Image: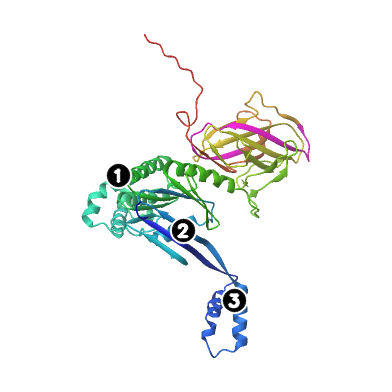
Amino acid sequence: MADPVIRVQEVDKVYGIWSDARARLTVPLAQKIDAVPFLPKSIKSRLQNHASSSFKEFYALRDISLDVFPGDAVGIIGKNGSGKSTLLQIIAGTLQATRGKVEAHGRVAALLELGSGFNPEFTGRENVYLNATVLGLKRREIDAKFEQIADFADIGEFMDQPTKTYSSGMMVRLAFSVQTLVDPDILIVDEALSVGDVFFQAKCIRRLHQYLENGGTLLFVTHDVSAVQRICQRAILLRQGKIAATGEPREITALYHTLDQPEDTTDETVTVCKAKVSRDGQDFQSVPLLRDTASGDGSAKIRGICLRDKSGRTTTGFNSGDIMAAQVMIDILKPMRDFDFGLGLRDKTGQLMGGYHTYYNISGKKIDRAEPGDRFLLTLRLELSLQPGSYLMIAGVATNFSRDKWTDHDTLWDCCKIDITGKAEFWGAFPLKSTYTQIKV
């Protein structure tokens, strides 16, 4: 077996957290106070006591060890704050580990923070030459690759404008083009594909496959678990700064969804609902619901949405074609008659991909009467016949519904995200009802 091109051994990253501004002075002083012989013991003791109560350590990473071998494509996933970006920065050399050892062999190209490595006063052309030079290319090598880099970035005349005038999409186009087309031995990508339009994202995915086919080594951080399954051979799940699991991407992304459950929060834009559902004896465990774009007159309130897979497990991750069971808990706050309910999924561009609505569905039964204090649990089963990717959920309660107007009581727009993985057994965004006849004439 070949030697690893990246070796991370028992790495910790620790940050100091001070309780106030004064502690930033007293804590470092207290840590060195024994070296000051003329200070009275009482003053030393007071400073050290204040330091111990005003300072604590926060472990962004703890005891991280991993090997990455030539040609590996490793996806790193985890919730926000799990340490993904910190780990990549340490491997790339832009951040120093507190403890442990990191080795990276070969030319390393890193797409980390948007615009990192670019001088905003330089033009795109000048930044291409600057970045490629830093990566070890000679002038003649950059000259030979420049047209290829410019064609891939496809920013036209902006190539000769200062990058401070670029949009975020233009910035990532140029950065991705430079970093992937200078033939690095190791490519590190941190959420770079989340910026830019869907066409450029597809172009980047094709480029990553080409890079890997040519023997490159990839470390890839993203929240798009379907991209991890499409690109990577191995996945690592980080949780609270530690490696929670490592293995085949499909298994690790499934585990990620079981761990990605709601936590208690004081954020007023998030509603988390926990209750006992007596009919089937299952616990009602809602996903976190973002309410910052909610609309409605307040006559009803969606308290929670519990999503289950075919085995009854609470999750936000499904395979294409799976049946998703959605339980929606609704509280009635004002009297209403004949209320309609709808639940749908939108893609990242905001396009409604499909769903269920009692107005359009013949079998849908409206609730003809509801009084303040009533609580309803609506259960809907949807076949997720969609291409792999991330989708945002809409759920709403309304009365007086028609095709072009209604009375909105509570609608949650893009209130939570679900991820669909696997392989779709149809052509297009979703399957169309069709018939096919073939006659030889």
| Location of residue 139 by image quarter | bottom left
What is the number of the mark on residue 65?
2
Q: Secondary structure at mark 1?
A: helix
Q: Disc 2 vs disc 3: which is toward the camera?
A: 2
Q: Is residue 362 left or right of residue 213?
A: right
Q: Disc 1 vs disc 3: which is toward the camera?
A: 3
Give the amino acid type for the residue marked by disc 3 in the picture.
Ala
Residue ID for mark 3: 51
| Location of residue 165 by image quarter | bottom left
**Is 114 above or below relative to 360?**
below
Give the amino acid type for the residue marked by disc 2 in the picture.
Ser
Q: How far apart are the alpha carbons under marks 2 and 1?
A: 39 Å
Toward the left, the furthest residue is: 140
x and y, in percent, of residue 256 in the image = 55, 47
Q: Could you say which is closer to the camera, residue 165 or residue 15? A: 15
Residue ID for mark 1: 151
Give the amino acid type for the residue marked by disc 1 in the picture.
Asp
Mark 3 or mark 1, which is nearer the start of the sequence? 3
Mark 3 or mark 2, which is nearer the start of the sequence? 3
Q: Which residues are magenta?
A: 369-394
Mark count: 3
At 52% from the left and 87% from the top, the residue drawn is 36
Q: Is residue 94 visible?
A: no
Residue density around tag 3, few if under 14, some if 14–19, many if 20 or more, within 10 Å: many
**Is 252 above or below relative to 358?**
below
